[in-house]
Amino acid sequence: MPELPEVETVRLSLEKLYLNKKIESVSILLPRMILSPINEFISTVQGTKFISFSRKGKYLLLNLDNGYTIVSHLRMEGKYIKIIRGEPLPKHARIVFHLNDNIDMVYDDSRSFGIMILVRSDDVLKLKEIAKLGKEPFEIDDPKYLFDKLKNKKNEIKACLLDQEIMCGLGNIYADEVLYKSKINPYRLANTLSLDECITIIDNSKKTLKHAIELGGSTISSYHPEKGVDGRFQNELMCYGKKGEKCPYCSSIFRKDELGGRGTTYCPSCQNVALRIGVTGKIASGKSTVLNYFKELGFKVFSSDEEVNRLYTLTSTKKGLINIFGESVLNDNLTISKGYIKNTIANNPQKKKELEKFIHPLVKKSIIDFIHKHKSEKLIIVEVPLMFETKFNLMFDYILGVTCSHSTQLSHLKSRGSKTITTDLIINQSNKFDKNACKCDFLINNDGTYNDLKKQIDLILKKLLNHSH
Ligand SMILES: [Zn+2]
């Protein structure tokens, strides 16, 4: 989809190719694209000259010498193509303006989403689609304009930058670029931005759009009426489309997530988006002790075990579990019997598989919600016992593995007063932590005292936070 710089590039080309050209006649091949009465459109346009080409947001304004304007929106794939009369029409020609000097200006649109409206030039700004547009960055002299518009918005700044009624001109590509250059977390709630940050955003929006316009936009030739005019700005993009590559400022890896239905690329370090730490390890290795220490330090933590317990209390989950295990999965008081589940899956691999297929996606969804909710934190910690088996490790920046000897593990289990040590150990056999330990970014050994454990965690935190913030 063309963004503002591409539309401006089209405007410049139209001006260069068709200024002062006379419209001798019009052929309308797809009438539904014209949102004005067709006969009136043809009779008003015929015999006039193009006196200027202007633009409001992504609307092109083709101004005629009789006081009328054709308002044109390219939507997904619309483009203007110049041909010499007699040459074959482009494949998706929809409207053809036959001009003097044997030139045809062809509006071509493979998706046919584009539109044209004929209005009196004086009324263009009153068109409801145009009237509701916010100011373009170039039109903003006082940054308080943006600050005031954002101060009551409780959604993410990225979503607000895409909202053309707040500020007009940034689409997905440029919104990512601007937030990256401004070092602003795309997940920050808009009403938390300071006036200084608004100034930075407006500044970077102007610079980025201006630079993009100079280079003909970011997309490959398809929108351009002249052959050979490519969107060279695509070579200048610093953040958009760089998922998995290294940030040139800090060497962190660019991430891409969905935000409000749109892909959003950002540098987690430069833009202060919470680092995601996954904690894993064998049964009774001390994962929850590690988690509790992080919590004590004030970080947001998520425990998959606790989440499973919570999920087990929901009616919908109970129904699912009864489907798998039958009514015997319920205690007398109709709560879920975890002991029954443990014993069953220890001896029945098929049931274990069914349980995992049912419960893992629910936990995954909860983790995603948790990550999303805390993106403006520095660091968040999520404990997942079967990290690698579930491939949940892909959701995290760093994986922290908790290791301990077999005897520590046994003594942990005993001190828990666990009556099901044998069952726990059988289930533990399917835990592939040992095999995957090499995939962890950090290993913590939990054979020593609680203080030893804390020291190791402090050291890791120091590394992570120094590196990134
Ligand atoms: Zn960076």
Image (cartoon, grey):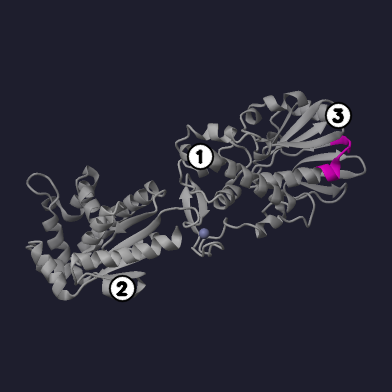
Is 233 magenta? The answer is: no
Give the amino acid type for the residue marked by disc 2 in the picture.
Answer: Ala
User: Which quarter of the rendered picture does the C terminus lie within?
Assistant: bottom left
Q: How many marks?
A: 3
Give the amino acid type for the residue marked by disc 1 in the picture.
Answer: Ser
Q: Earlier in the sequence, mark 1 or mark 2?
A: 1
Classify mark 3: residues with Cα within 10 Å, few (<14), some (14-19) or many (20+).
Answer: some
Classify mark 2: residues with Cα within 10 Å, few (<14), some (14-19) or many (20+).
Answer: some
**Percent coordinates x, y for residue 403 in the rendering:** 24, 71
Which quarter of the figure has residue 109?
A: top right
> In terms of secondary structure, where does tag 1 sit?
loop
Looking at the rendered image, the disc whose residue lies closer to the viewer, 2 or 3, is: 2
Is 21 magenta? The answer is: yes
Residue at x 15%, y 58% (from the top left corner): 341
Residue at x 47%, y 57% (from the top left corner): 269
Residue 231 is left or right of residue 172, and the answer is right
The residue singled out by tag 2 in the image is: 437
The residue singled out by tag 3 in the image is: 65
Residue 256 is left or right of residue 73, and the answer is left
**Mark pair 1, 2: CA separation:** 44 Å
**Percent coordinates x, y for residue 262 in the rendering:** 51, 48
Residue at x 77%, y 30% (from the top left corner): 69
Near-viewer residue (340 or 180): 180
